[in-house]
Amino acid sequence: MHESPQLFASAFPHVTKGFTLLELIVVISIMVIIVSLCIPAATSIQKSFQLTAGAQMVGNQLGLARQVAITRNHSVEIRFYQFGDSEVPGEQVTVPGSGQYRAFQAFEIQETGSANAMGKMQRLPVSIVMDSGVTLSSLISGFVPMTGGTLGVSLPRVQTQYNAVSFRFLPDGSTNLAKTERWFLTLHNMNDGNALALPPKNFATLQVNPSNGHIKSYRP
């Protein structure tokens, strides 16, 4: 025997069929607030992750370059590249000086003096750059940049429209850097600016010992 809907409703007078419009508005408002609070935190985490990844990329390349120099008894040159990114406001691919130092590459120096690339150019994560100022990056500011045309090496997307500074690891593991100076390189978010007088809130610094080539990293 089936009971009628009227009898069921009278037996359970407090049963509702769904949310009211006011309840839905309250729930949606709470969700909007939660999302708005989570977005900045997620963005900060992403930037920190990219910075960590960039520092590891550079550190790994420096360590590999030193090891290859010792193993093969050849000097290995590390080049840091500056070039413009057409997707970044104010930068032009045809004007390397308008861009940032955002990539690097290692070259094995042969007995003839020729430089053979050990691998492809490595570009930092899109939001990460190497500061070019004397305060944060003596490994860049301490040298006069060479042009891509002079070096004769074509890079993806920019060909020879770039500037580069470099130093070398020697066969004994040391470097060709002045032994009386401190040599370091600082990475940070592109939006922090460039040639900063003080480190930004989030940064990574790699220091190279000129006498033995050992590398240390620092994070705040």
Image: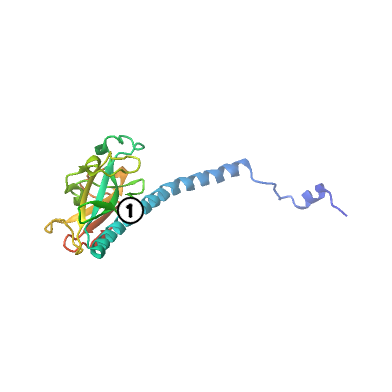
Instruction: Name the residue type under label 1.
Output: Gly
Please give the name of the residue rendered at 31% of the width and 36% of the height, measured from the top-left corner. 93
- In the image, taking residue 14 as reference, residue 137 lies left or right, namely left
Residue marked by disc 1: 119
- Percent x, y for residue 199? 24, 50
- Neighbor class of circle 1 (other Cα within 10 Å; few <14, some 14-19, many 20+) is few
- Percent x, y for residue 24? 59, 43
Please give the name of the residue rendered at 36% of the width and 53% of the height, measured from the top-left corner. 48
Question: Foreground residue, 153 or 34?
Answer: 153
Question: Foreground residue, 62 or 192?
Answer: 62
- Percent x, y for residue 85? 33, 39
Please give the name of the residue rendered at 71% of the width and 50% of the height, measured from the top-left corner. 15
Question: Foreground residue, 184 or 165?
Answer: 165
Above or below — where is 69 with respect to 27? below
Q: Looking at the image, can residue 8 be seen?
A: yes
- In the image, taking residue 40 as reference, residue 68 lies left or right, namely left
Which residue extends farthest front? 112
- In the image, taking residue 44 as reference, residue 153 lies left or right, namely left
In which quadrant is the C terminus drawn?
bottom left
Above or below — where is 130 with respect to 85? below
Q: Give the number of marks.
A: 1
Task: Specify how the rendered protein is coloured.
Answer: rainbow
Please give the name of the residue rendered at 27% of the width and 46% of the height, measured from the top-left corner. 81
In which quadrant is the N terminus drawn?
bottom right
- Percent x, y for residue 203? 29, 52
